[in-house]
Amino acid sequence: MSSKSNTSKRYTAEFKRDAVALALSSGRTPTEVARELGVSAEGLRNWVNQARADRGEGPAGALTSDEREELVRLRRRDREQQQTIEILKKGLAFFAKEMK
């Protein structure tokens, strides 16, 4: 059985920024830096990759943090609009049935 918890730790933006700076400037591997900081290596690699994308140094098509936030907001709005449309369709069907 795994000793890891199913809950993820939340780190402050300042901690992430400092961890990324350390990983990029230390000359050590992200795994070594992550072990030293007590975070997952994969998590630190993700933070480094996101920081590079935010600076325009990521792979082609990589989204910046601002673009990711906007995408989440737009998807949430789309989902809410789809729910509204479904409610209106059901209401229209109900009243059309009542008018017969």
Image (tube, rainbow, N blue to C red):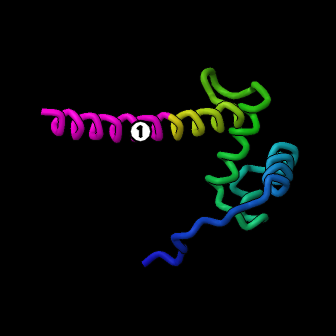
Left or right of residue 36: residue 58? left
- Mark 1 nearby-residue class (10 Å; few <14, some 14–19, many ≥20): few
Q: Which residues are magenta?
A: 78-100
Q: In percent of the image, x 52 and y 40: which residue is there?
A: 76
Q: Main secondary structure of the magenta part?
A: helix
Where residue 90 appears, x then y in whole percent? 27, 40
Left or right of residue 59: residue 22? right
Q: In percent of the image, x 73 and y 59: which residue is there?
A: 34
Which corner quadrant holds the C terminus?
top left
Question: Please, what is the three-letter code of the amino acid marked with disc 1?
Answer: Thr
Q: Is residue 47 above or below residue 74?
A: below
Q: In percent of the image, x 79 and y 29: which residue is there?
A: 55
Q: Would you say residue 64 sits in the magenta stretch?
A: no
Where residue 35 appears, x then y in whole percent? 72, 64
| Residue sitting at the far top | 60
Q: Is residue 36 above or below residue 70?
A: below
Q: Would you say residue 92 sits in the magenta stretch?
A: yes
Looking at the rendered structure, the secondary structure element under dot 1 is helix
Where residue 96 appears, x then y in whole percent? 20, 33
Q: Which residue is mark 1?
A: 84
Left or right of residue 31: residue 14? right
Taking depth in this image into account, of 63 and 59 the one nearest to the observer is: 63
Taking depth in this image into account, of 96 and 7 the one nearest to the observer is: 96
Where residue 29 appears, x then y in whole percent? 73, 50
